[in-house]
Image: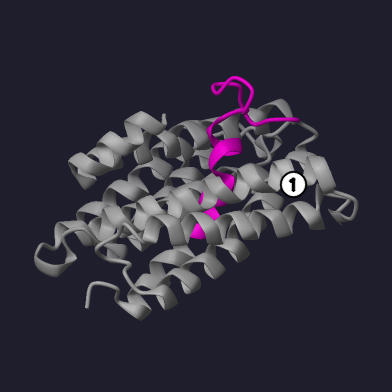
Amino acid sequence: MAAAFIAATVWRPAAVMVIVVAAVGLAAFEFLTQSESAGYRPATVVGVVGAVAAPLAAYWIGDAALPLVFAFAFLATAVTFIAADGVESAPLPNTAITMMPLIWVGLLGSYAALILRFSTFGGSYENTGTDTFFILVIGVIAHDIVAFFAGRSAGRTPLRAWISPNKTVEGLIGGIVGTFIAVIAVGMQSTTWDDPSEWIMLAIVISIFAPLGDLAESMFKRNLNIKDFGSVLKGHGGALDRFDSLLFAMPAVYYLTLVIQPWS
């Protein structure tokens, strides 16, 4: 996965989009499938198609396309249950559960497309999208890895025990340190993010939102009474289990990029 991601980043943003769309589609499918095992009956086809359409539309047109995608997705979901045989289809909870991956995976995943889209503008923007996304991914991975080992070796204080007893304050602190080291190390090689103040702001944003994404995913799994959303990545669960932190961090990094404009 790392080799494919690096090769795609070096080649062109459209190649990275192939990975993004595949991950978003798989993650949405995993969530809806696990929802079915918990007793819900979502409109799975609508949920997966809508989630995949969101980043594609964002990359092609921009964020202005997203309201249209979600409006049509909601309408399609409503029509699906209008066509059901009766109220026994539980249209309200099943419409809600169908919209969940559209927002969580499709909308938040669209910010990967919006970040990569910077590299399609040409000129001084040429490397902004791929550079930003690469640093973001490395920062999130560093947070997850260091938090895991720091928590295993020194974790004593539960972060949110009712969500996950294995997540600790000590692991969180270790993850933050790992994020700062990784972002600075990669930022030193970047021609876009080339100012120490930018590295610090980027590391702060990732350190806040990556653990929130991890906690949110653990909270939803506990509510569904499952261990993992999938098993496609042996030893790591599914796509949603692997990319949960990234989903929360991408919108924050996108708007940070717009504010500080590292290409200028």
Task: State the residue in front, 77 or 122.
Answer: 122
Task: State the residue in front, 23 or 75.
Answer: 23
244 vs 56, left or right, is right
Quadrant showing the N terminus: top left
Q: Is residue 213 visible?
A: yes
* Residue 94 placement: quadrant: top right
248 vs 183, left or right, is right
Q: Position of residue 237 (x, y in %)?
A: 62, 27
- Residue under numbered circle 1: 150
Quadrant showing the C terminus: bottom left
| Residue at figure coordinates x 61%, y 26% from the top left | 230
| Residue at figure coordinates x 60%, y 51% from the top left | 143
| Residue at figure coordinates x 18%, y 40% from the top left | 11
**Circle 1: residue type:** Ala
Vertical relation: 64 (above or below) 69: below
Q: Is residue 166 visible?
A: no
Q: Does dot 1 land on a helix, a strand or a loop?
A: helix
Q: Position of residue 200 (x, y in %)?
A: 49, 72
The question of residue 235 being in magenta is answered with yes
